[in-house]
Image: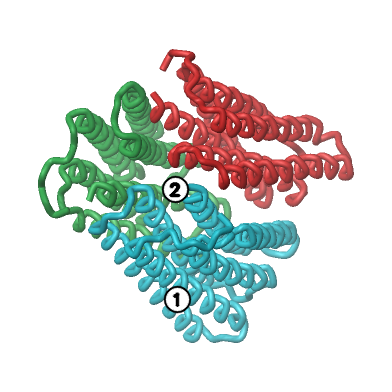
Chain colours: A cyan, B green, C red
Amino acid sequence: MASIVHWLLPKEEKFFQMLQEQCSNVVDGANEFKNLVNNYNEMDYSRKRDFIKKIKDIEHKGDNLTHKIIGILDKTFVTPIDKEDIHRLAVLLDDVIDLIDSTAERLIIFKIDKIDSYIKDSTDVVLKIVKEIEQGVVGVSKLKNMNQFYINVHTLENKGDDLYRGALSSLFNKKGLVDIIKYKDIYDFLENITDKCEDIANVIESIVVKHA
Amino acid sequence: MASIVHWLLPKEEKFFQMLQEQCSNVVDGANEFKNLVNNYNEMDYSRKRDFIKKIKDIEHKGDNLTHKIIGILDKTFVTPIDKEDIHRLAVLLDDVIDLIDSTAERLIIFKIDKIDSYIKDSTDVVLKIVKEIEQGVVGVSKLKNMNQFYINVHTLENKGDDLYRGALSSLFNKKGLVDIIKYKDIYDFLENITDKCEDIANVIESIVVKHA
Amino acid sequence: MASIVHWLLPKEEKFFQMLQEQCSNVVDGANEFKNLVNNYNEMDYSRKRDFIKKIKDIEHKGDNLTHKIIGILDKTFVTPIDKEDIHRLAVLLDDVIDLIDSTAERLIIFKIDKIDSYIKDSTDVVLKIVKEIEQGVVGVSKLKNMNQFYINVHTLENKGDDLYRGALSSLFNKKGLVDIIKYKDIYDFLENITDKCEDIANVIESIVVKHA
């Protein structure tokens, strides 16, 4: 596994390039989401809507990339098991950008008027973990040693968990009942994003396992 | 893929017939659920309970179909990968009827006394999407061109999402706090059903991918 | 399938031994969780924290076991499909202990001061179902007849569902609004544990299916 010998055939390489494109789109979405969150408390409604629209556009671009990958996969001979994994990664990356989009939308739908420090910190973790995933997809296509990748994703996911726990434990002290429901929902979404990234790391791990 | 050549061996065909039976049972459940929802506001408690029981019976029939498929799969030689996909479809179809049953039950458990327009509209989407899934399972067994199927499921899932967003955004204006919690839970369930149908579409897509 | 002929190669047997170790760690966690729940109402805060810590240690041990399995799997030649299933079981068993840990933590985070009968009864079901899973992992490695295993897991999962339904239906009568939110969250977690165990049973079923 530590070897750097190239294992991908040209066709498979093409898919990993497309998966990387999908990853970089997810990172774009996480970046815009961070911009929204960091400036949310000072923005007026129409500026917020602009950000939501920008993120929605990135989500649509993600849809198209996902279907492009699956469509080409459909017409290409790759070994069945590789096909399954590529398919699974494409679907999971699509889930991540969907979740980022849904979280952003919820801020508006719920008429949240103040981003709290948990949402801010957790958005940082989201951006960092999707950047790790991007590196992981590059790494697996080169059969790089992935130990550091697993550790990084795991560490970030744990940090996300800690933040989530902290947020839950202060949730019931500070907020009114309607806010408890709204913020809890948003916290749950943010935690789901990091969980989903761990699922991606697991698929990457299983690809490595099968090609070791 | 556009070809209509038959790729299934007789044994695999038998499983797809059983999966179709499972699908048509899911459609039955969605139909009864729609009947319950459409007439809910005018029914008395015992009529509601009758519907819940009818749906529960369909759910039990679904359990039996699922276990029958898996039991026969158990004793039959099919290629390992086909086995896995058939198994996965059987489990997911079982999840869909379970979710329909759970959503119906929640109406009673939560003593919901008024079905709102979101629940009604979303139930329509559920019925349409399970009918699409039924067609998809028929289609994949004949290796039909499945592009329209993906588009339809995706479109319905998007419509479900839009309805869900609308429901969430009016939820906090209109209802009391206890109702917010109850209706949100039911909205989440309804949205899960369409999500699960998208998962089924993904498995169908991956079967097509592997047999292309 | 009823035969007791040994199908595992020595290398695969080693993995099933490690999975059994993981299972017995999950059972340890469920046992401590039951001790916590059964004595919760009489314990002071620092005793509760001791239990939470004990469970957290078991969860960490679970992390290490999971990564050990995946790490060795990484360097070992087993057939690709077996690798995938072993990987999936390791990840799911890790999920179960994570969920037990999260549920226990929530009792403290939410400052729950009284364990109700649903939490108690449901914790009993959790302990029973993880013990079944432990037997299932032993059983599949010996290709024992697994029918009774499926029935037991299914029966326990149904019992968990019934308890959950009962808990939901009394939730809105008895508790204040903040408690409704807190207890519902804990009920959902407990139900997720039994659901996840059913997922494990499904993977075991699919292993049996493929090796039948």
Tell me the kind of residue under disc 1: Ile
In the rendered structure, the answer to whether residue C32 lies left or right of residue A100 reads right
Looking at the figure, which quarter contains the C terminus of chain C?
A: top left
In the image, is A23 to the left or to the right of B40?
right
User: Is C35 in front, or is A83?
Assistant: A83
Task: Check disc 1 and report its element: helix, strand or loop.
Answer: helix
* Residue B57 visible in rendering: no
Residue found at x 73% / y 64%: A174
Q: Chain of mark 1?
A: A
Give how far across and how far down residue B55 sits, in percent.
34, 32
Does A127 sit above or below residue B19? below
Q: Quadrant of the N terminus of chain C?
A: top left
x and y percent of residue B23 in the render? Answer: 26, 37
Question: Which residue type does callout 2 highlight?
Answer: Phe
Tell which tag, 1 or 2, sits nearer the viewer. Answer: 1
Q: Is the C-beta separation of discs 1 and 2 under 8 Å?
A: no
Residue, disc 1: A55
Q: Is residue B94 left or right of residue B151?
A: right
- Badge 1: residue crowd in 10 Å (few <14, some 14–19, many ≥20): many
To which chain does the residue with label 2 belong?
A: B
Q: Is residue C97 above or below residue A142?
A: above
Furthest residue to the left? B4
User: Does any portion of residue C141 appear in the rendered image?
Assistant: yes
Which is more toward the observer, A176 or A9?
Answer: A9
Res C15 label: none
List the residue tagged with mark 2. B189
Q: State the residue in front, B69 or C121.
A: B69
B101 displayed left or right of A155: left
Q: Position of residue B194 (x, y in %)?
A: 36, 51
- Please say if B72 is above or below B24: above
Q: Residue at x 51, y 71 (%)?
A: A104
The image shows residue A54, relative to residue B63, as above or below, that is below
